[in-house]
Amino acid sequence: MRALFLFLASSGAALACSGPGAADLIHRAELLGLLGHGLAVVTMVGATWLSVRRKVIGGPLGAGWFLVVAHPNLWTSATGGDCGQQLEVSSLLFTGLTVGVLAWSAFRPLKADPPAATDA
């Protein structure tokens, strides 16, 4: 068991990506990362527009834009030994979280206006 763990944890032994079809896997991972990042940007533009229109600024918007800036497409390479599997999984995760931020900003309740002072 220990030998198996050491083999899997060794530098690149279990994550090597080579042979026929490796270039296609890398290309697919890069495309998925790019599309996921683009969808996250479009989603956050929509969430920001929706929040401004509903006059509910703050809360999830900062978290959503952080997810866009920290998206793995910007800092993870698909050519690093695992044929882009880490890029695919993390891109899907970040994009899904960003879509969740859109849902949060779309369905959260509006803030109640304070009662107006009346002259009595």
Image (cartoon, rainbow, N blue to C red):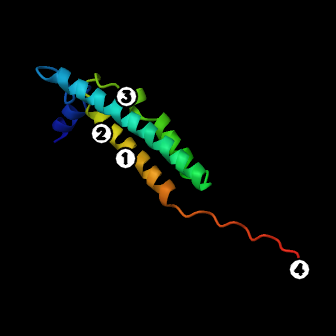
Query: Residue at position x 59%, y 63% from top?
Result: 110
Q: Residues within 10 Å of mark 1 (few under 14, many from 20)?
A: some
Q: Is residue 117 visible?
A: yes
- Name the amino acid type tagged 3: Thr
Marks 4,3: beta carbons within 8 A: no
**Above/below status of 115 relative to 89:** below
CA separation, marks 2 and 4? 63 Å
Which residue has dot 1 on it?
A: 96
Q: Earlier in the sequence, mark 2 or mark 1?
A: 2
Which residue has dot 2 on it?
A: 89
Labels 4, 1: front one: 4
Total numbered labels placed on residues in the image? 4
Labels 2, 1: front one: 1
Q: Secondary structure at mark 1?
A: helix
Q: Is residue 82 visible?
A: no
CA separation, marks 2 and 1? 11 Å
To which quarter of the image does residue 19 belong? top left
Labels 4, 3: front one: 4
- Image coords of residue 3 (percent x, y): 17, 35
Labels 3, 1: front one: 1
Pick the quarter of the image with the N terminus.
top left
Q: Earlier in the sequence, mark 3 or mark 2?
A: 3
Marks 2,1: beta carbons within 8 A: no
Query: Residue at position x 78%, y 70% from top?
Result: 116
Which residue has dot 3 on it?
A: 76
Query: Residue at position x 75%, y 71% from top?
Result: 115
Q: Secondary structure at mark 4?
A: loop
Which residue has dot 4 on it?
A: 120
- Name the amino acid type tagged 1: Gly
Marks 2,4: beta carbons within 8 A: no
- Name the amino acid type tagged 2: Val
